Amino acid sequence: MGKLMSDSLFNLTGKVAIVTGSSRGLGQYMARALARSGADMVVTSRTLDSLRTVKGEIEAIGTKVLPLELDVREYDSIQHMVEEAYNHYGKIDILVNNAGCNVRKPSVDVTWEDWDLIVNTNLKGTFFTAQAVAKKMIPRKYGRIINIGSVTSVFGYASLAPYCASRGGTKQLTMSLADDWGVHGITVNCLAPGWFRTEQTKVLYEDKTWLEYITDRIPLKHPGKPNDLDGTVVFLASDASEYLTGQTILVDGGISTGATRATAQKK
């Protein structure tokens, strides 16, 4: 029964998936997870050279992989990537909108350029990539779009104002697109990781005081490991989630419960 359920609901064999920003960080893990479930992949980065490692890893898994350049801040780059992917495979079934960036600084120090960089990448880029892919999905009446958000889609943190704004916007955008495209058989959901160590956050994890502070607030008592997202991204990409749309799923060890530090609880 377990194998039958796996084959019928979670097997992505024959599907084509795009994961943007998949040269490093959580994107490469999600790309490998989809490939292990059988999907043929499109991986993207601003430079093709940076995709060599993940391309080789996916080829070793045994599925097809097409590396493409993409800068989500450039409209023409988005259109070109989607056309290349579509022309190569003949369809696009799954989009994981993962490309993102951050600049961590006090709000009074945020520049106009900082704001544009973060919001144009994380929110504007997410919308226009989803739009371009949806145009290919709509005629086929099928699609799975997974926008990558963050625990900051529902929480605010100091020194992250533009980032929190962009991720909160991703949550709202997800609901709007789900309403727009549900009639076409396209589901749109937001996968929101909690605290994971990536290139963007590694400086925080080098601070032992901060690491203790954040770990105390996570009910499972440890930050996320990159593979902790595998099951959820495969679920959202698969037929198992066909009646789930417009939702934000937090994979955060429970920090969004509002847990307080154990030391504070003892007082």
Image: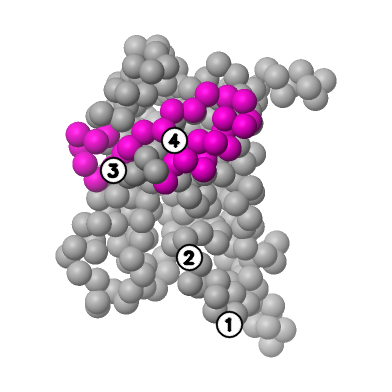
Mark 3 vs mark 4, CA separation in Å: 12 Å
Residue matched to label 1: 209
Indicate which disc residue 137 carries: none
Q: Please report the bounds of the magenta region as a residue range.
A: 50-78
**Quarter of the figure that contains the N terminus:** top right
For image coordinates 51% across by 59% down, the residue present is: 198
Q: In front here: 6 or 28?
A: 28
Callout 1 crowding tier (Cα within 10 Å): few <14, some 14–19, many ≥20: few
For image coordinates 29% across by 57% down, the residue present is: 118
Indicate which disc residue 201 carries: 2
In the rendered structure, are the residues bearing label 3 and label 4 in contact, judged by CB atoms less than 8 Å apart? Answer: no
Mark 1 vs mark 4, CA separation in Å: 36 Å
- Measured as percent of width and height from the top left, residue 65 is found at 49, 28
In the rendered picture of this protein, how many numbered marks are placed on residues?
Answer: 4
Q: Mark 4: which secondary structure?
A: strand
Callout 3 crowding tier (Cα within 10 Å): few <14, some 14–19, many ≥20: some
Considering only order in the chain, which callout, 4 or 1, is on the residue closer to the N terminus? 4
Amino acid tagged 1:
Thr
For image coordinates 24% across by 36% down, the residue present is: 77
Considering only order in the chain, which callout, 3 or 1, is on the residue closer to the N terminus? 3
> Can residue 145 be spotted in the picture?
no
Indicate which disc residue 71 carries: 3
Q: Mark 2: which secondary structure?
A: loop
Q: Residue furthest right?
A: 1
